[in-house]
């Protein structure tokens, strides 16, 4: 049995990615973990008191979105763990894949113009994950 690591940003745009991960976990009999990475670097240009409040709220929001993903998996008969990481998205996904001993990383397709990645960049990132960690990575 392997472990599927599904990077998710939460919300409706991530449901297709989460559903694909849940279905693959069922088919393969693998464990499933949802990963949310929050990068708080944008707060470095903000006043210190605000920094703490906003940072805490971002963390809570990410945890809440992961709990929703976990509940969605449970409703389909899959027990999923949740992982939150703080740092740069690209670095933290690779670190999590290695540290969690993942056998598969799942990334969602870009969700329109507001996405952090264009499809070509996402394909390059998936190849980078595979090259650096040895973990198969797919885009759904």
Image (spheres, rainbow, N blue to C red):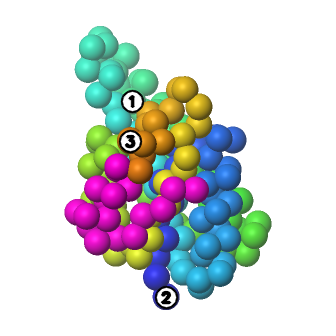
Residue at the spot of label 2: 1
Residue 2 magenta-drawn? no
Calculate the distance from the C-alpha at mark 1 to the C-alpha at mark 2: 36 Å
Crowding at mark 3 (Cα within 10 Å: few <14, some 14-19, many 20+): few
Query: x, y (%) of residue 130?
Result: 32, 65
Residue at the spot of label 3: 121
Identify the mark nearer the N-term, 3 or 1. Answer: 1
Kindly identify the residue that appears in the image at 59 percent across and 31 percent down: 112
Judged from the image, the secondary structure of the residue bearing numbered disc 1 is: helix
In the picture as drawn, the residue positioned furthest to the right comes out as 75
Judged from the image, the secondary structure of the residue bearing numbered disc 3 is: helix
Q: Nearer the viewer, mark 3 or mark 2?
A: 3
Q: Can you say whether 63 is above or below 138 in the image?
A: above
Horizontal relation, residue 89 to residue 30: left or right = left
Crowding at mark 1 (Cα within 10 Å: few <14, some 14-19, many 20+): some
- The answer to whether one can see residue 15 in this image is yes
- Disc 3, disc 1: CB below 8 Å? no
Q: Can you say whether 74 is above or below 48 in the image?
A: below
Calculate the distance from the C-alpha at mark 3 to the C-alpha at mark 2: 30 Å
In the picture as drawn, the residue positioned furthest to the front comes out as 120
| Quarter of image, res 65 | top right
- The answer to whether one can see residue 71 in this image is no
Q: Which residues are magenta?
A: 124-140
Calculate the distance from the C-alpha at mark 3 to the C-alpha at mark 1: 28 Å
Identify the mark nearer the N-term, 1 or 2. Answer: 2
Identify the mark nearer the N-term, 3 or 2. Answer: 2
Residue at the spot of label 1: 55
Q: Nearer the viewer, mark 3 or mark 1?
A: 3
Task: Using the image as rendered, state which of residue 18 and residue 52 is in the foreground.
Answer: 18
């Amino acid at each position: 049995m392997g472990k599927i690591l599904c990077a998710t940003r939460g919300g409706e745009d991530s449901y297709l990615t989460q559903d694909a991960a849940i279905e693959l976990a069922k088919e393969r009999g693998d464990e499933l973990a949802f990963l949310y990475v929050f990068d708080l670097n944008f707060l470095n240009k903000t006043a210190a008191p605000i920094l703490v409040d906003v940072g805490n709220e971002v963390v809570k929001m990410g945890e809440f979105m992961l709990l929703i993903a976990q509940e969605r998996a449970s409703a389909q008969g899959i027990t999923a763990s949740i992982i939150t990481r703080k740092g740069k998205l690209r670095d933290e996904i690779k670190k999590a894949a290695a540290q969690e001993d993942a056998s598969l990383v799942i990334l969602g397709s870009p969700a329109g113009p507001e996405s952090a990645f264009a499809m070509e960049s996402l394909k390059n990132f998936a190849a980078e994950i595979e090259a650096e960690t040895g973990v198969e990575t797919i885009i759904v």
